[in-house]
Amino acid sequence: MRALVLLVALAVVLSACGGLFAAGELTPVPSARATATPAVPSASVAIASPTATPRPTPAAGACQREPSSCAIADAIAKIDPAKMNDHLVALTSVGSRDPRHPGHAKAVAYIKEQLNALAYYGWKIETQKTSYQGIALENIFASLDGASAASSGTASPRPKPPTRTVLVSAHYDSTANRTAGWRPAVDAAPGADDNATGTAALLEFARVISQTVRERLESRITLAFFDGEELYFKGSAAWLATLKKPYDIKAAINLDMIGFNPLADRLDLLWYTNASAGLRDQVIAANDKYGIGVTPLIAQFAADGNTIMDAAPFGIAGIPSIALCQRYGETDATFPGNYTFHTVNDTAAQITNKRLWLKAAKLTLATALELASSP
Ligand SMILES: [Zn+2]
């Protein structure tokens, strides 16, 4: 039993959410650039919308202590776990989101349908098609520009500052390559924890931002639904390769596997190079400030050659980048290992810690909105 646990743990260490990072495919920016982007201190948060009746929630407590945080507290309180679950059920019901499987196109259609329904609020929906070894991949993006830019066509336009982008990403592709005999084009790969949980959270962010803080944003927010993560970050790396330098991404936040852990509301907070240290600290501060209650929240430096997940290409390129994952590495007292990982058994029924899932979503959105509160 212990040997089995160790084997599973090793598999998680080596292949959780993807695989080994092919560092040679990216050209890192000089480290001087990497240190030029400090995290936005909370004092500069411009989103402010005091609510008349503070709610009896931890986030409302943050609002009472610091009125500038009220709009963000209000936004994260509006994340609806039932809506996230609806998305997860839809995403897992296509059978597989492996890009070689017919279910993949159904997932793409679902994500686009959900985003297009919010286009009225100003979201710009874009896709990027690429390929890897003949396998067609498609990244999907939803971007909302800052209020300053959006108001330029109004009667009293505000000057349009050069806004940078807060990138929030999750990969939507799936795999079951740890199931013996699994055939990518035919067999199931429900990918509930990995990574319908993160994908569903992003879809809910689009709704919540539309209905709460959209007119108060000072930076562009881009929600990126990456493909090909299970083929070693081929989607995210392909997109990064198209971006001009210096990068205008002020922060990249990635969600990957956030709903399984039955033991604790634990998240590992992966960070990459010194450029990511300020962002890491801002996430830790937001967890306290908004009373989100992720515990333990364990920062882990992840810039070695085994770096995994879609945050890695951005982090190694010198962009402030972090990933939130329920566990990055071996099992311990707060994580039993996810035996469904990369198997046909990673089903919606296995998402047993929905409280953790919601907390991870709140922590991500709170951090992203704080960052988007300035140009
Ligand atoms: Zn993953």
Image: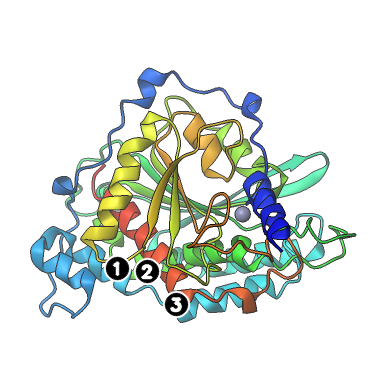
Residue sitting at x 18%, y 72%: 60
- Give the structural element (helix, strand or loop) at label 1: helix
Tag 1–tag 2 contact (CB < 8 Å):
yes
Q: Residue at x 52, y 65 (%)?
A: 115
Looking at the rendered image, the quarter that the N terminus falls into is bottom right
Work out how far the residue at label 2 is from the one at label 3, CA to CA, in angstroms. 12 Å
Asked if disc 1 is less than 8 Å from ligand 1, the answer is: no
Horizontal and vertical percent for residue 24? Answer: 65, 24
Identify the mark at residue 81; answer none if there is no mark: 3
Q: Is residue 221 visible?
A: yes
Residue 341 falls left or right of residue 364: right
Q: Residue at x 68, y 68 (%)?
A: 346
Q: What amino acid is labelled 1 in the image?
A: Ala
Residue position for label 2: 208
Which quadrant of the rendered structure holds the C terminus?
A: top left
The picture places residue 97, in percent across and down from the top left corner, at: 72, 62
**Which residue is identified by label 1?**
75
Q: Amino acid at mark 3?
A: Pro
- Closer to the N terminus: mark 2 or mark 3? 3
* Percent x, y of residue 287: 29, 59
